[in-house]
Image: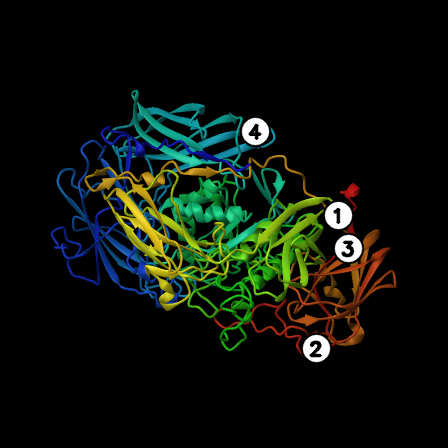
Amino acid sequence: MKKKVLSIVLFSLWCCLGTAQPRQTFSFNAEWRYHIGDLPGAEQANFDDTAWRNTTLPRAWNEDEAFAKPIHEHSTAIVWYRKKFSVPKDVPSDKVFLEFEGVRMGAEFYVNGKLVGRHENGVMAVGLDISDVVLRSGENTIAVRTDNSWTYREKVSNSTFQWNDKNFNANYGGIPKNVWIHFTGKLYQTLPLYSNLGTTGTYVYAKKIDVAGKRLELHVESEIRNETDEAKDGTFLVDVRDMSGRQVRSFAVPFSIEAGGRKILSAQSPLTGVNFWNWGYGYLYTVTSTLRVSGADVDVVHTKTGFRKTAFKQGMVFLNDQVLMMKGYAQRTSNEWPAVGLSVPPWLSDFSNRMMVESNANLVRWMHVTPWRQDVESCDRVGLLQMLPAGDAEKDVEGRRWEQRKELMRDAIIYYRNSPSVLFYESGNESISEEHMAEMKAIRDRFDPHGGRAIGSREMLDSKLAEYGGEMLYINKSAKHPMIATEYMRDEGLRKYWDEFTYPFHREGEGPPYKGNDASDYNRNQDQHALEAVRRWWEYWKVRPGTGRRVSSGGVNIIFSDSNTHYRGKENYRRSGEVDAMRIPKDAYFAHQVMWDGWVDADPKGLHIVGHWNYNDGLQKDVYVISGGERVELFVNGRSQGFGQRSYQFLFTFPQVLFEKGEIVARSYNAEGELLNEKKMQTTGEPYQLKLKAVHGENGIFADGNDMVLVEVEVQDKEGRRCPTATNMVDFAWEGPMDWRGGIAQGPNNYILAESLPVEGGVNRVLLRTQYGRGGHVVVRAQANGLLGDSLSFGVSPVDDKSGLFIKHAAAGLPSNMQRGEGINKRPLQWTRRSLLIAGARAGANEHRASASFDDNELSDWVNDGRRSTAWIEYTLEKVSDIDEIDVKLNNFRSRAYPLQIFIDDKLVFDGETETTLGYYTITVPRTRGRRVKVQLKDSSYVAAENLHAEIGGKKLDDGVARDDANARGTLSIIEIDIHSRLHPKEE
């Protein structure tokens, strides 16, 4: 049962404005002005900025270009920002800190005309101590000079930043993330902002985790500073409250700190009755750490966190003592929306990230650069695991650029180490050297030694230090550290195109070449995009946990939502999302919902009919059904069309079904013929009316200049059903204190910011944004020629302004997603095969290298000398066994086919050809008992699928070990082989 639990708001920053607190934090987002272009003297307090444009943060100054321009055309400029503010009278003001969650790319900060800091990595948060320059009475001015040049160079070193890249790091310039101001006394707990401040904040972690017993040992560490002139003695108190606000533990330890001192306080206590954070179960606690001196609370910090147990071993990921196969998305860190970029309100981050969980994804890999705080905290709430990068492009680097990456990783670890959803730290978007891996591990071990997070990098197939790895597109197996495919399935497809039989009748694959190569894979229709998703995931599912000693730990599909980044298809943005840029699902979204619904194996009840049932009379077409069941039967108006042809485990095809208006029904069954599930699809009537629906944060709509409302428009028939083939143009109008940001559709300028735009597949969405300080009533209307229109209304609540500062209510009280339940004591891992250990091997040539084909290292192989007569290798098992299946990874696995013969104790059990794969080809043989397994090349291998696909820079994609076997017709090269005996259910 799906349910939501509202988090109780415990942070002191949400308290009454009129009451002084030990620490107060306000949003610093309001009432900024900005100017595009460099201006001398703009940092000075008395500079005249009255002609500048007004803005409320977070907001990129070039946000209008999101999805209107391709990424490499995003505008760059020097842009100045200025804001005036006063220090409230009822806050502690001995220490005043500014926290910028991120600027793009470089920025210099001035307060009252004085330089207070510089930040240049364009990704992470930065802290500024402005205590010595801020005026406690009177008006202050902050000025920020930003530069989002693609070629921005670090001032001290003159080095560029590797991740400031025109292909993947969308350039939303200026200050596109939140800004906060913190007021404290001189004895305080530091902020987790290492850049500029050099401080590490609070660290909450657990030891001695007993999942079954629901208990753990809680540790709370907090770095404190005493900037007074005298030593201080006091008490460090810890209060722990669950999601209902109920206190579940409190404990305390004494502390002493010298004048001018800095130290880390530590307290620990057992915690029982623990609700563990889990996939789809965003259970969070509030841990409050307090400094109390002479009976008075002088500083209070609230940390939202969750507790879970992890392990990374035997090629698998364990969460709360259970094996979890990684299933999810490699999502662009910008996670952007049309005409807005990344700067969305917190509830909209939850909306998008929760959709990933609702597609049954458990992992998001943010690509190339560290995500912003809002997305990280969102994943905590929705129960979505994260793979967190530092910053990279596509390769290991040296010198200053490597140091920049290490510094970014350090800052990210310190900032996010209390987030339970962060499970992986990614050191590179390509393999890195063992020396560099050791340096990254040292950073993790210094700043997050107890967080239960693995650190690794893309690839790292033969690393002895990485705690996880995995190639970009291919299948890797391991018996050691988990292998997770980091971005599989690049295929692109527009939501607008259902299939070749539906207007606008887009021919599958039609589009211009990409870099001179056929680009059909990047111009798909929805139906084929969904089918390809099934075919790709099937290769990972085949070698999932439970299928032997060496397994794949899963993979992440690139990408979740269409993105304003590098593209290969016809449009000017990337359309490989399972949802479009407005988060409207494509059919591939529902395909994953079926295949991924489970910790490892899919729920057999999963069922989805691909496409729609609105065609012209007399049409015959293939009907596709995706199911977790063993058999699927299709009915048209009550008449059975028989059982589907099963392929790729989850796909059931019904060839050339005759269309008839009415209803189609798909029914799935288990192996015993018992009904599992039923799904229906009906022919809808003609478009008749529009229907509007408003989506917004459950905690309200606030006039903070960043909050938004997502309005969905649907074309319906008279029965209120969505018309799936409708493409009507819809004209919008609105009244009230909101700004139009609109949506996206295929057409002029992608209809960015247009107030009239078409529905696609019968539906579209638009965004409206609140205006700072202007509450009130809003009405939205929609009209379309020949259809009944619709309207809706809602109210916008004002915010409490305090001298240019305010409380960001839109970020408070957001509900956690608890839809999957606590997920403890699920069915244990089902083992389907037992790997048979190899004792040794002999070969026709290069016998000294034979062991390289079973060494659990996919960067090495055994290869003969190129002659057909020596193209064989024979493996001897440790003992006589029943043999059923052989997984083999052959060189050039994605392009070449190999005619093979396999003998068991000299008996021929297989005579056939391999097929091209993303890694492993599985050969099934009649169960044969024996000890010796011989693999022999029967005839010359040949190119079965041309390897035309290239990386962004033009380099061809990998196809096995780095060796040219193109002309070696008698070559047999085996990268890895696994020999298995299938297990019957009673043997599991």
C-alpha distance separating marks 1 and 2: 46 Å
C-alpha distance separating marks 3 and 1: 34 Å
Circle 3 is placed at which residue position? 838
Q: Residue at x 54, y 71 (%)?
A: 507
- Foreground disc of the pair 4, 3: 4
Circle 1 is placed at which residue position? 671
Circle 4 is placed at which residue position? 214
- Whole-percent x, y for residue 729 in the image: 39, 62
The residue most toward the top is 295
- Whole-percent x, y for residue 498 in the image: 53, 63
Q: How is the image coloured?
A: rainbow
- Foreground disc of the pair 4, 2: 4
Indicate which disc, 2 or 3, sits on the residue closer to the N terminus: 3
- Foreground disc of the pair 1, 2: 1
C-alpha distance separating marks 4 and 2: 60 Å
Q: Residue at x 74, y 63 (%)?
A: 850
In the rendered view, tell whether residue 868 sits above or below residue 918. Answer: below
Closer to us: 592 or 867: 592
The residue most toward the bottom is 967
Say left or right for 28 vs 203: left
Q: Amino acid at mark 3?
A: Ile
Crowding at dot 2, Cα within 10 Å, few <14 / some 14-19 / many 20+, comes out as some
Circle 2 is placed at which residue position? 968
Q: Amino acid at mark 2?
A: Ala
- Foreground disc of the pair 4, 1: 1
Q: Amino acid at mark 1?
A: Ala
